[in-house]
Amino acid sequence: MGTTINRVAAIQFLLLLFCCGAEADEWRTQSARRFGVSAQIPSSWLMEEPPVNNDGRRFTSPDKTASIVISGRFAILSYQEEIADATKSVEGRTVTYIAKGNRWIVTSGVEGDKIYYRKSMLVCRDTIWNNLWIEYLAVEKDRYDSLVRRVSKSLRTVPSDECSFVSTEKKQPHLGKCEGILHLNSGELTFGGGAGEGEGVCVINADEQERVLATCSPAKYCKVQGAVELCKDSGECVEISDIISVSRR
């Protein structure tokens, strides 16, 4: 009887790891008080000990193959320098998706056998960067798609020790750009979301597709500049419209 019970318990534990590594029925809001960064994290993920400087929190999946980090830091670099740092490819890491606006940057790419997703928001009257970093095995991309979308959409700024000011100003479209391999699927032009390209997706506004296709071809590199804003139904998606330039290599 004891052996049977132990075996059942072991099976249940393995099923928990399998089902909850990327998905979770329950979520909790976690925050790092010093810089005021907050996001929803699956309840089954383990929070590690806070760093000595208390600048963020790190969470590890039950199977220990993925991690989520929310953190903050002072905006020492200029905005353009921050963009350059976020979008550059370094040894062993390839950036496959870039989206940016006036006060935010989203990049995604591949590093070794893992996909990473980075989202940074300039807050507190442009004095603090609040950051989200998600990393997981590339072979698990389909399992992690919904998790990345939810965590990214939930990223928020809350009152903090370093800055008590939280802007409530309504966000407006702003000048930005999307670049990478152009995809045409079911009549929709997009960047990102393909194999090895990470999670972020940039959608070309339907009224602007003809202009983009006049310069760029699907499955080829393209860069589009225009008004960029978050998609209404997804925190993992941006839409670009009012295009001012289109270029190709």
Image: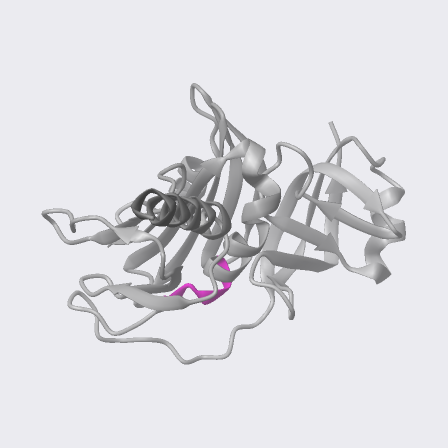
Which percent across, then down, holds residue 32?
23, 61
Whether residue 152 is visible to the viewer of this picture, yes or no, is: yes
Instruction: Answer with left or right where residue 181 lies relative to residue 137.
Output: right
Decide which of 169, 201 is in the foreground and name it: 201
Residue stretch in magenta:
152-156
Q: Residue at x 83, y 56 (%)?
A: 208
Decide which of 115, 91 is in the foreground and name it: 115
157 in relation to 107, above or below: below
Instruction: Answer with left or right where residue 115 lies relative to residue 40.
Output: right
Q: Main secondary structure of the magenta part?
A: helix
Toward the top, the furthest residue is 91
Which percent across, then down, holds residue 176?
59, 53
Instruction: Answer with left or right where residue 46 lies relative to residue 108.
Output: left
Decide which of 166, 102 is in the foreground and name it: 166
112 in relation to 188, above or below: above
Q: Let me know if residue 186 is in the magenta part.
A: no
Q: Residue at x 47, y 31 (%)?
A: 88
Which percent across, then down, holds residue 117?
48, 44
Q: Residue at x 64, y 70 (%)?
A: 232
Decide which of 136, 221 is in the foreground and name it: 136
Which percent across, then down, holds residue 50?
16, 51
Toward the left, the furthest residue is 52
Q: Residue at x 72, y 54 (%)?
A: 203
Toward the front, the furthest residue is 1
Whether residue 74 is visible to the viewer of this picture, yes or no, is: no
